[in-house]
Image (spheres, rainbow, N blue to C red):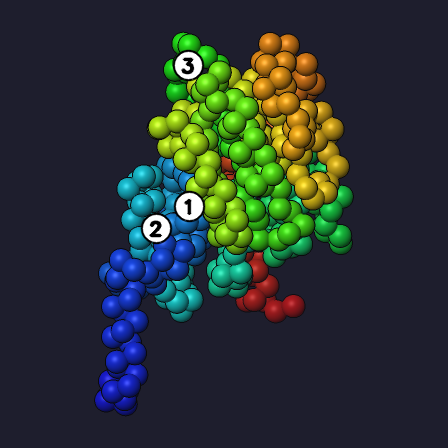
Amino acid sequence: MAESRIGPGARLRQWLIERVRRSRFLPVGVPDKRTDTDRLGRPFTGAVLVYFPNGADALYQLRPWLPALRALDAAHGVTVVFKDSRTAAIVRRESGLDCVTLARYGQLDEILAVSEVKLALYVNHDPINFECLRFTSLVHVYLGHGDSDKGVSVSNQIKAYDFCFLAGQAALDRTSAAVMLYDAPARSVLIGQPQLDVPAPEPQPDPTRPTVLYAPTWEASQPSVSYGSLISHGAAILDALAGDYRVIYRPHPLNGVIDPDYGRADAAIRERAERGDTDVPLERSFADADLLITDVSAVVLHWLPSGKPLLVCRPRVPVPPSRLMQTLPLLDEDADVASLVAEHLHADPTAAARRDLVRYYLGDTTPGAATERFVGACTDLIALRDRRWAEHVARGATGP
């Protein structure tokens, strides 16, 4: 009967939408919403849900957390919920985690009603997160996908979550200073950066010359935090270092999404780079490089524990004051890049000051310590949820 009430025009639209969703022409950034229908009505088996409604172009936000999520899965069971089946397939293959694609809020509601999920984790502030944030039976935790001195590292949106997991004291100080009417110490848990616990590959240095990693950030969706150096510094860096140095170029996956000029600058630098030096995996590039040139971004903190020198391109827009930016050497647009690189490779004048920053920004960087704190913090919140839920149920049974 329901089918008969759908007119031919609506049926045609539904058919066309389904064909587009299955088509190879659907952009990777547009979720295909191809529901795993075999999972409808069946409970999630674990206590933890990771909500990731984005497409594959945003996987750089989720991928760094996958090793820690595997550790959490072993302790409590983890299901990752997607709106894009292609992205789910990638994460399922790379992580082995339970990955489910759901198109609509109602489908998630149906499954949670028969599940024992107690904790929901989020790696970004996508507005679609609110479809999951609506569930009052869960503790909601913002993980984020990077900690840095970028202006977007703190957002009023964190008030939507019950707790926020932060790397170190620097992030807590930053949040306390920047977010008004928010009790950051009460709502923050310092866990370090589990992303750093992944064993680094053995270095394979170029025996003939030093290696420099150039890893700029993208143009950003907000002009006030457009810290990317591709247009201002990129070509000059490649020109100055060509020949005497091996330059690995590590582009940001979103280059050119907002500003086509960044896309053109990215393409130009790819053409300048030596063959193979634009496709080096991040862990391999970190291991092989002797010096990093980057922008104000989370890349700085990932590099910091290596103890190796780095230069930060001075952005064209103001950056919030921080101990990191007061310590690190800044590369101006008109700087003598080759001389600065040589100086910092040979003398490394900020080495001691950088060592002092590691604990402030990252906490304990002993291998495995951050992952242990992450799993422990999730365990504590699951226990907290159980206590509060029992109190909630008791109040409902006895009245106010």
From the image, tell me which residue sits under label 3: 205
Question: From mark 3 to mark 1, how far is it between C-alphas?
Answer: 29 Å
Query: Which kind of residue does numbered mark 3 sit on?
Result: Pro
- Nearest to the observer: residue 332 or residue 345: 332
| Image-quadrant location for residue 74 | top left
> Is the Cβ of the residue at disc 1 closer than 8 Å to that at disc 2?
yes
Asked which secondary structure carries label 2, the reply is: helix
Q: Position of residue 236 (x, y in %)?
A: 56, 30
- Nearest to the observer: residue 314 or residue 114: 314
> Is the Cβ of the residue at disc 3 closer than 8 Å to that at disc 1?
no
Q: Is residue 265 visible?
A: yes
Q: Please state if 325 lies on the left or on the right of 286 as rendered.
A: right
State the quadrant of the N terminus.
Answer: bottom left
Q: Is residue 11 above or below residue 351?
A: below
Question: From mark 3 to mark 2, how far is it between C-alphas?
Answer: 34 Å
Asked which secondary structure carries label 1, the reply is: helix
Identify the mark nearer the N-term, 3 or 2: 2
Q: Residue at x 65, y 68 (%)?
A: 400
Q: Position of residue 108 (x, y in %)?
A: 40, 63
Q: Please state if 285 lies on the left or on the right of 146 as rendered.
A: left
